[in-house]
Amino acid sequence: MALRSAVLIFNPNAGAIIRRRPRFDAALAELRRQGISLTVAPTRSPGHAAELAGNAVAGGAEAIIAAGGDGTVNEVLNGMAGSRVPLAVLPCGPANVLACETGMRRDALAAARQFPELGRSRIAVGRLKAAGAAPRYFLLMAGVGLDAEVLRHVDLDLKRRWGKLAYWMAGFSLAGRALNQARVATSDGLVLTTSFALAARVRNYGGDLAIAAGADLLRDDFELVAFRAKTTWPYLAYLGGAAIGQAARIPGVEAMRATSLRCDPTNGPVFVQVDGEPAGELPARIETVPDAITLMLPRAATSRRS
């Protein structure tokens, strides 16, 4: 079913869009060439994308296009989860994990040219409820511990200028540190102690790594990957395993399927993230919400569902 109209939400101050603005404008022109009437809605501040998405749903939008990185997509999701309005993504971020996972091109113009071939799939999403914070939905992953700690050390100016390099620099700045631990209880009653737990709905992590090799966006659960290291040094080995898609085979790593988790700190503050954005700290509950969003995906991705 071809789109006739859509509300396109984007962050005009995002570094990836600023650096490649001609490419972004060409992508919008391509969508209009396909006959899609676009209502372009730029964000003004953090959280504004969720408000714009909610307003678009309430106003009867035929579809919503989130143009940006995974953080922008997450904000848009949080404004429309539970609705029947389809969500499409125009990748314009430093990592574009969702695009990597689903076969969307990571270049905005190339991705715009794929729109006539997109199918629609009704899928589950994740939901995180952290201490003292409103619930947050996520499409990709929720991270407990180390990766959320890395996000707290990312230089935002450097991120705007250099994209993913800022994350790598933040990660290596933590080399040799002792890590606070979390107690994670799964929906099946298993209890783990971990310095980093990833509740993943996708295999791809950061656009470069495959941590949760068994995750599937079209399933109604997530893959939990838990790392037991007490300092950052063993993560060098874990990183090597993730680089070849074999993280769960490294000693000190466990992987399993789950539909909900209860996470509590054991020896100090432990932080959480969703879809690469900080989301508070433990204690927290992570769960899946079936039948939550209609996502527009390349047909090769939707055909995996039998």
Image (cartoon, rainbow, N blue to C red):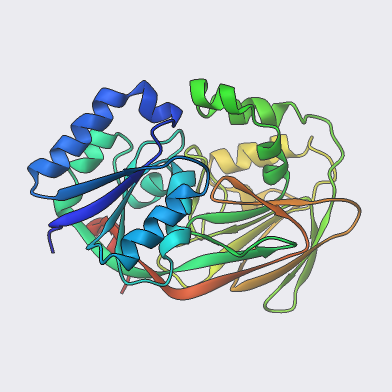
Question: Along the horizontal axis of the image, is 119 left or right of 81?
Answer: left
Where is residue 165 drawn, in percent x and y? 56, 25
Residue visible at 68% across and 60% down in the picture: 133
Residue visible at 37% across and 21% down in the picture: 19
Judged from this view, the residue extending furthest toward the right is 267
Residue 185: which quarter of the image? bottom right
Quadrant location of the C terminus in the rendered image: bottom left
Q: Nearer the viewer, residue 306 or 277?
A: 277
Q: Is residue 82 above or below residue 100?
A: below
Where is residue 23 drawn, in percent x and y? 25, 27
Question: Along the horizontal axis of the image, is 114 left or right of 231?
Answer: left
Question: Along the horizontal axis of the image, is 266 left or right of 122?
Answer: right
Q: Is residue 108 above or below residue 72?
A: above
Is residue 191 visible in the rendered image? The answer is yes
Question: Along the horizontal axis of the image, is 159 left or right of 149?
Answer: left
Where is residue 199 drawn, in percent x and y? 61, 60
Residue 237: which quarter of the image? top right
Q: Is residue 244 above or below residue 224?
A: above
Q: Nearer the viewer, residue 265 or 178?
A: 265
Is residue 303 visible in the rendered image? The answer is no
Residue visible at 48% across and 60% down in the picture: 78
Q: Is residue 200 above or below residue 285?
A: above
Count numbered badges in the picture. 0
Quadrant location of the N terminus in the rendered image: bottom left
Where is residue 22 drawn, in percent x and y? 25, 24
